[in-house]
């Protein structure tokens, strides 16, 4: 929100400097986003007279203007504004002037063959608003050559503050002045909002409420006043300057008054041309199929949840949001119906989201406007209309009732010290709350504090502590270090947080790039990867192809790989650690770690090489990545069940899963199924894996975290090779497990080094060769001991698989 220092001083009697006020604003919670001296920013812009405006010979939408800017010569200026015309007065920038609205410095130029010596400016180009439909038009008596900031009264300080959603009271300059006065920067000035003497009965009666018994109504109270015989037209120069300084374009006196009250007191109003109303206005919800042609020149479709003010011809105003063009006030308006209403903040916000309209009224009303200002706000607007436009005010028409929070909080004064560490005397606490508008009753340690109507966000004792703290100053809150603990701090990260971190490091170390993909995927892909339940479909999807919560990380990674391949990078390794959604229950949200390799992106590198043909990624690349993650997480893959039953997305026979049992599946790995690759528009090899980090067992806690002594045998290991003839269906894992169990004391490692199938080994048979490493500990093994272990290995493998030793 923007406001000027001069405007603030109309409500705050203060001697504080502009910088002191800026620092205080941030200190009391109204964060200062910017502070500009408009006299410095816009000091180079001058008032100019457009002597002539002729059609550009080489461009249909451009004009060549002769401009007198008070420099003693007539300048040629090319202008594209539709309202540029001979005889008008506007704002001009000489070459070399910085244009704040465009962040450029203009110079002399040639546009379509015509020399241009400067620029005629719009309000947007000066940074004074969003109006860029045409250049600024000034009255004919505007003095040529005078600085525009001096003429328009823009040579003051402009503040831009950030207002949190709970501070509707700070959306008006008066509310900001009230906070600064409570902070000690001056004295708050009062505003005369007493009732205006009426001249007769209003021709428009109290507005009927035509709401059904089950209908939600956004409006709470409506106050209106008919003012006849006004003399509308351009508003006074001081009012126009005030609005331009904060980025608003002056319209006419009546409309400018409504904006002045909205910005000055945080009390939005709306004015209707009473002569354009058809019959008696009513308050009701919109009907199906109704539309409103709003003041922003756009047509909006309405529905039955939106409250409107309507007459016999249809909606006049979308309640709390924006008025319509049909009843808009223009310079020729003679009779005005002024509206000041109280609205439900949540329903205003919902209507605003549905329509997408972001108006000044919505900005304030959805933050809760002071309900006690409904009628006083109308009286204030009436006074300003009578002062600037004349006219005769009729009796006000009131309907509905305001909803006051009427909150009383039991406030133990000791809470200030407990929650903030500030030592504030009881008298000072009471004084601060009083200056902010709170009334206190009671004596002793606990007060009954009545909350003012403009602060519905204050509902509990912690809110009152915050009010005291921001008035004392956030910088006064003591900074104290946490007490040193006498013992070692417990583990901070949870198990799943540790697993995420470790998995990321392990996969990055294997050359995979981390990706962060959407948690939403197309419905058909969700179904394909085991999801797609109705409970996991989004009610308000952000895009048509992001309708379901993902049951797997692989669709997003494959889509990322596909996009890379379409851009010429088909060899890529990606991983992601993130959430998947197996159901809509809390326990259905799991953390997975997944990775893919495509093309030739193996651990040893991707792409072609002179030493030989690059191999495509395969099932064992995925298995190696999965094993690396499990190893980093402290899980021994050899103690898990490796089952040759792949996931549905796996290529048949080229994938598998790891599990602790049939009901505790830890992960899957393998190559992408060709049918799935075709369905997902993938024409390159893909090897993938996925681990359910939540399913991993908790590691056993050791008595100590220190590492044990290094146990390395000084004796040479002994290696023996065995070649077994087994059925083709036998797995290498079964052979390895059996061989390791033959003598757990001596056998240190068992690996497969050869697999062979052929006609001479027999139909349905294969040869599997393993290397067994024996590690003696206390003495060198004798030939008899080695032969004994070898016999035990052969016997164990034969018992487990029916294998025979090849001769």
Image: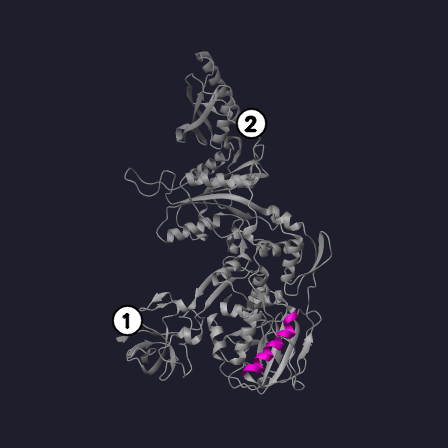
Residue 203 image offset from top left, x and y in percent = 65, 86
- Which residue is at a point 60% across and 54% down the rendered structure image? 469
Of the 4 image quadrants, the one containing the C terminus is: top left
Residue 176 included in the magenta stretch of the image: no
Q: Quadrant of residue 348?
A: bottom right
Count residues near mark 1 (Cα–Cα under 10 Å), then give few for <14, some for 14-19, many for 20+. some
Q: CA distance from mark 2 to mark 1?
A: 78 Å
Q: Quadrant of residue 92?
A: bottom left
Query: Does 11 appear above or below 683?
Result: below
Kindly state the secondary structure of the residue where label 2 is placed: loop
Frontmost residue, 49 versus 595: 49
Residue 617 image offset from top left, x and y in percent = 39, 41
- Which residue is at a point 53% across and 47% down the rendered structure image? 579
Question: Which mark lies nearer to you, 2 or 1?
Answer: 1
What label does residue 520 carry, if any?
A: none
Kindly state the secondary structure of the residue where label 1 is placed: loop
* Residue assigned mark 2: 704
Q: Is residue 690 left or right of residue 603?
A: right
* Residue assigned mark 1: 108
Residue 268 image offset from top left, x and y in percent = 58, 72
Frontmost residue, 543 versus 433: 433
- Which residue is at a point 43% across and 51% down the rendered structure image? 560
Q: Quadrant of residue 187?
A: bottom right
Q: Which residues are magenta?
A: 372-388
Which color scheme does this rendered protein use?
Answer: one colour
- Which residue is at a point 66% across and 69% down the rendered structure image? 216
């Amino acid at each position: 929100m923007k406001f000027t220092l001069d405007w603030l001083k109309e409500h705050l009697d203060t001697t504080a400097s502009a910088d002191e006020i800026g620092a205080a604003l941030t200190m009391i919670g109204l964060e200062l986003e910017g502070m500009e001296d408009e006299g410095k920013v816009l000091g180079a812009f001058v008032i100019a007279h457009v002597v002539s405006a002729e059609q550009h010979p080489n461009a249909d939408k451009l004009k060549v203007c002769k401009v007198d800017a008070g420099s003693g010569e007539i300048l040629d200026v090319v202008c594209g504004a539709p309202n540029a015309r001979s005889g008008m007065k506007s704002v001009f920038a000489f070459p070399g002037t910085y244009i704040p609205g465009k962040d450029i410095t203009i110079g002399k130029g040639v546009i379509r063959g015509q020399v241009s010596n400067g620029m005629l400016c719009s309000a947007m180009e000066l940074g004074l608003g969003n109006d860029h439909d045409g250049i600024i038009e000034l009255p004919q008596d505007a003095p040529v050559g005078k600085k525009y900031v001096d003429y328009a009264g823009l040579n003051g300080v402009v503040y831009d503050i950030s207002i949190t959603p709970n501070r509707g009271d700070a959306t008006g300059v008066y509310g900001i002045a009230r906070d600064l006065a409570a902070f000690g920067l001056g004295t708050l000035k009062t505003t005369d909002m007493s009732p205006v003497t009426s001249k007769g009965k209003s021709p428009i009666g109290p507005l009927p409420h035509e709401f059904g018994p089950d209908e939600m109504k956004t409006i709470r109270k409506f106050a209106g006043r008919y003012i006849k015989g006004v003399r509308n037209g351009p508003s006074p120069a001081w009012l126009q300057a005030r609005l331009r300084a904060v980025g608003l374009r002056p319209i006419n006196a009546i409309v400018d008054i409504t904006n002045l009250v909205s910005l000055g007191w945080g009390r939005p109003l709306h004015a209707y041309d009473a002569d354009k109303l058809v019959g008696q206005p009513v308050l009701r919800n919109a009907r199906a199929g109704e539309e409103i042609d709003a003041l922003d020149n756009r047509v909006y479709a309405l529905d039955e949840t939106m409250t409107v003010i309507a007459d016999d011809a249809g909606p006049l105003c979308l309640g709390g949001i924006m008025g319509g063009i049909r009843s808009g006030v223009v310079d020729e308006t003679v009779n005005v119906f002024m509206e000041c209403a109280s609205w439900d903040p949540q329903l205003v916000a919902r209507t605003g989201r549905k329509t997408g309209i972001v108006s000044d009224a919505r900005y304030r009303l959805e933050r809760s406007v002071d309900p006690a200002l409904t009628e006083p706000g109308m009286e204030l607007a009436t006074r300003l209309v009578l002062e600037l436009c004349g006219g005769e005010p009729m009796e006000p028409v009131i309907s509905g009732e305001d909803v006051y929070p009427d909150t009383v909080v039991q406030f133990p004064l000791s809470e200030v010290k407990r929650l903030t560490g500030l030592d504030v005397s009881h008298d000072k606490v009471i004084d601060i709350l009083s200056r902010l508008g709170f009334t206190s009753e009671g004596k002793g340690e606990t007060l009954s504090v009545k909350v003012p109507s403009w602060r519905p966000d204050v509902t509990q004792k912690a809110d009152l502590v915050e009010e005291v703290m921001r008035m004392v100053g956030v910088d006064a809150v003591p900074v104290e270090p946490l007490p040193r603990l006498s013992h070692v701090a417990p583990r901070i990260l949870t198990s799943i947080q540790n697993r995420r971190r470790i998995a990321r490091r392990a996969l990055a170390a294997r050359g995979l790039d981390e990706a962060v993909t959407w948690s939403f995927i197309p419905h058909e892909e969700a179904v394909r990867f085991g999801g797609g339940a109705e409970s996991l479909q989004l009610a308000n999807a952000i895009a048509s192809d992001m309708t379901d919560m993902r049951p797997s990380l692989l669709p997003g990674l494959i889509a990322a790989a596909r996009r890379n391949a379409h851009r010429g990078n088909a060899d890529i390794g990606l991983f992601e650690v993130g959430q998947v959604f197996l159901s809509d229950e809390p326990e259905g949200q799991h953390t997975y770690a997944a990775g893919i390799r495509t093309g030739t992106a193996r651990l040893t590198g991707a792409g072609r090489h002179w030493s030989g043909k690059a191999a495509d990624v395969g099932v064992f690349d995925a298995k190696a990545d999965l094993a690396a993650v499990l190893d980093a997480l402290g899980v021994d893959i050899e103690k898990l069940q490796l089952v040759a039953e792949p996931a549905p997305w796996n290529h048949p026979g080229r994938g598998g899963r790891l599990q602790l049992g049939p009901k505790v599946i830890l992960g899957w790995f393998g190559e992408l199924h060709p049918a799935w690759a075709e369905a997902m528009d993938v024409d390159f090899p893909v090897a993938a894996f996925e681990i359910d980090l939540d399913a991993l067992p908790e590691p056993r806690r050791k008595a100590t975290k220190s590492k044990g002594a290094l146990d390395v045998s000084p004796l040479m290991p002994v290696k023996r090779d065995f070649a077994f003839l087994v059925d083709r269906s036998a797995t290498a894992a079964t052979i390895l497990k059996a061989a390791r169990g033959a003598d757990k004391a001596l056998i240190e490692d068992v690996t497969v080094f050869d697999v062979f199938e052929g006609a001479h080994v027999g139909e349905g048979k294969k040869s599997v060769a393993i290397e067994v490493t024996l590690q003696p500990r206390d003495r060198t093994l004798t030939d008899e001991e080695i032969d004994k272990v070898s016999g035990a290995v052969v016997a164990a493998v034969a018992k487990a698989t029916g294998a025979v030793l090849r001769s």
